Image (cartoon, rainbow, N blue to C red):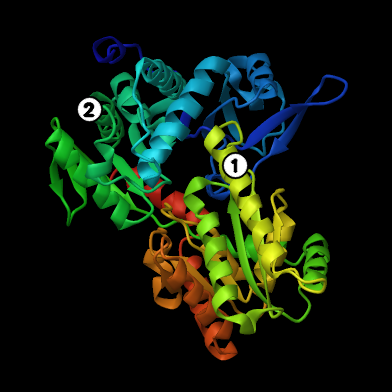
């Protein structure tokens, strides 16, 4: 690929800055009359990209649904902006990748292999199994990454900066460099990175392809230094790369890739404004009516295996069993929003969450007291209302690249909130000093941390919350994005 594509005629793309991610800033549905309907997304990446003041910047993303694929098909070269769609003033190229290829790449490799590797999720006596079917899925993942690399190569202006996002696109930097060696390429991992002992579960050639894929970038970014060093360890162990842990560089096959650490923070201005709109106030009134004058333990998660919801419930049950003084004096508000429902493991996990919540209700509930209030339907205003109401926030993931909930709750808390935080969350590197740290596997210690949070004096809670909020908002999404972009540019 490299010998042919490096001799191509001058690139024709006009984009000086490009972003690539699986999910884009917009998605489509189909109205009753058959017309396409458009919905804009949110999140740190959308907010970050808004910092680019350049009308020629392009966001390349995948079509995730039949409606998305139709929109991509009907737009010239998949360019939604050129098809007249209101995509928020951004140029968006949506790739209509074959649905079967996409499903194998997304579900089979990205979410069932790479996600599991980096979050240490496998039950190794039975999984993983890397058989012929896995090789078919890997071929699809390679094709999916190739489609992104080709689109980026076509859109990029000479010397453009390209920011590739996450484990879905780990092969893109190397593929893109082969096609366009003139580009400045960055890759950012929003997940943790597996230690060498766990990465070796992958077939040797696959582990090597993931590592060299990312090393095709000029810079590889991570949420914490811990994850950056884990990546460097893997490169040293499996590729024989030369690693400088002080300078944070990895040199392999004659090229040096710089490692960057960018701890994505909460968007304070947006959160504080959004948390006081009427729809949030209404939901807050409903929650207060349910809670009464009791204390609250709040958690807000997706029903994602790594979020450790089940052990969180077990810890709360242990608190109620061992400290009966909390009976009728505390309510656990738990929002566990659906995640990856097309994967059997996630459906089973959601069922387990529901069943355990019901057991706790049955064991401790009275006609006047609901000890645990569980919702599994997504409702962002209700989440913000719970943030405002929380006396204690429980964030206990098994492993997490960052965890923005841990950063968001202190920002919008009305009266101050004690944060019970897993030491395995990336956010712990910034928030651990003012949080109540826990081993996410230790049910007894987590229950004791909940008790400590519930009994924490109000002035201490308020002081800790103030410091947590300051740390949580130190690198808001726009600055987080611009820091990476500036580091890619010459002299950065």
Residue drawn at x 61%, y 36% is: 341
Viewed as shown, does residue 284 lie left or right of 239? Answer: right
Residue drawn at x 50%, y 46% is: 305
Viewed as shown, does residue 269 lie left or right of 172? Answer: right
Q: Residue 109 in the image: state x and y as whole percent.
A: 42, 28
Q: How many marks?
A: 2
Which residue is at the front of the view, 35 or 356?
Answer: 356
Which residue is at the front of the view, 69 or 461?
Answer: 461
Q: Residue 432 in the image: state x and y as whole percent.
A: 40, 71
Most extreme residue toward the right is 33
Viewed as shown, does residue 481 lie left or right of 210? Answer: right
Which dot marks residue 40?
A: none
Residue at mark 2:
204
- The image quadrant of residue 169 is top left
Query: 10 Å neighbourhood of mark 2: few (<14), some, or many (≥20)?
Result: few
Earlier residue among tags 2 and 1:
2
Residue at mark 1:
339
Q: Secondary structure at mark 2?
A: helix
Q: CA distance from mark 2 to mark 1?
A: 30 Å
Most extreme residue toward the front is 363
Query: 10 Å neighbourhood of mark 1: few (<14), some, or many (≥20)?
Result: some
Q: Secondary structure at mark 1?
A: loop
Q: Residue 25 in the image: state x and y as whole percent.
A: 61, 38
Residue 238 against residue 419 in the figure, above or below: above
Residue 492 seen by the camera: no
Residue drawn at x 36%, y 17% is: 135
Residue 389 seen by the camera: yes
Q: Which part of the image, by quadrant, shows the N terminus?
A: top left
Residue 320 against residue 2 in the figure, above or below: below
């Amino acid at each position: 690929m490299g010998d042919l594509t490096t001799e191509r005629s001058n690139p024709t793309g006009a984009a000086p800055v490009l972003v690539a991610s699986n999910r884009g800033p917009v998605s489509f549905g189909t109205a009753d009359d058959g017309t396409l309907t458009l919905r804009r997304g949110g999140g740190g990446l959308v907010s970050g990209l808004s910092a680019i003041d350049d009308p020629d910047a392009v966001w390349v993303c995948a079509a995730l649904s039949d409606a998305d694929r139709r929109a991509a098909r009907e737009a010239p070269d998949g360019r939604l902006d050129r098809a007249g769609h209101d995509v928020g003033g951004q140029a968006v190229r949506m790739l209509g990748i074959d649905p079967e290829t996409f499903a194998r790449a997304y579900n089979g490799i990205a979410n069932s292999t790479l996600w599991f590797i980096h979050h240490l999720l496998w039950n190794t006596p039975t999984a993983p199994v890397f058989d012929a079917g896995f090789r078919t899925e890997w071929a699809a993942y390679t094709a999916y990454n190739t489609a992104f690399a080709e689109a980026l190569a076509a859109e990029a202006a000479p010397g453009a900066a390209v920011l590739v996002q996450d484990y879905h696109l780990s092969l893109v930097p190397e593929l893109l460099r082969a096609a366009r060696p003139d580009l400045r390429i960055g890759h950012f991992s929003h997940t943790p990175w597996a230690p060498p002992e766990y990465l070796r579960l992958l077939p040797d050639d696959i582990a090597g392809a993931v590592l060299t894929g990312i090393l095709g970038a000029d810079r590889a970014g991570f949420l914490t230094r811990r994850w950056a060093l884990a990546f460097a360890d893997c490169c040293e162990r499996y590729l024989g790369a030369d690693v400088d842990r002080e300078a944070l560089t990895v040199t392999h096959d004659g090229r040096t890739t710089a490692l960057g650490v960018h701890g994505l923070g909460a968007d304070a201005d947006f959160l504080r404004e959004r948390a006081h709109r009427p729809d949030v106030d209404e939901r807050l009134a409903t929650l207060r009516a349910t809670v009464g004058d009791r204390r609250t333990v709040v958690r807000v998660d997706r029903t994602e295996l790594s979020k450790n919801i089940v052990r969180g419930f077990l810890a709360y049950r242990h608190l109620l069993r061992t400290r009966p003084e909390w009976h009728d004096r505390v309510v656990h508000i738990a929002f566990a929003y659906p995640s990856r429902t097309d994967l059997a493991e996630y459906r089973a996990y959601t069922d387990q969450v529901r069943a355990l919540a019901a057991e706790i209700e049955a064991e401790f509930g009275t006609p006047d007291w609901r000890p645990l209030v569980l919702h599994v339907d997504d409702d962002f205003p209700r989440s913000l209302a719970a943030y405002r109401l929380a006396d204690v926030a429980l964030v206990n993931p098994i492993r997490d690249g960052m965890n923005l909930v841990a950063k968001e709750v202190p920002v919008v808390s009305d009266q101050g909130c004690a944060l019970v935080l897993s030491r395995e969350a990336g956010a712990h590197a910034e928030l651990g000093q003012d949080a109540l740290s826990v081993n996410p596997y230790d049910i007894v210690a987590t229950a004791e941390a909940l008790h400590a949070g519930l009994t924490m004096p109000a002035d201490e809670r308020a002081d800790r919350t103030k410091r947590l909020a300051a740390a949580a908002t130190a690198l808001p999404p726009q600055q987080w994005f611009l820091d990476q972009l500036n580091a890619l540019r010459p002299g950065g």
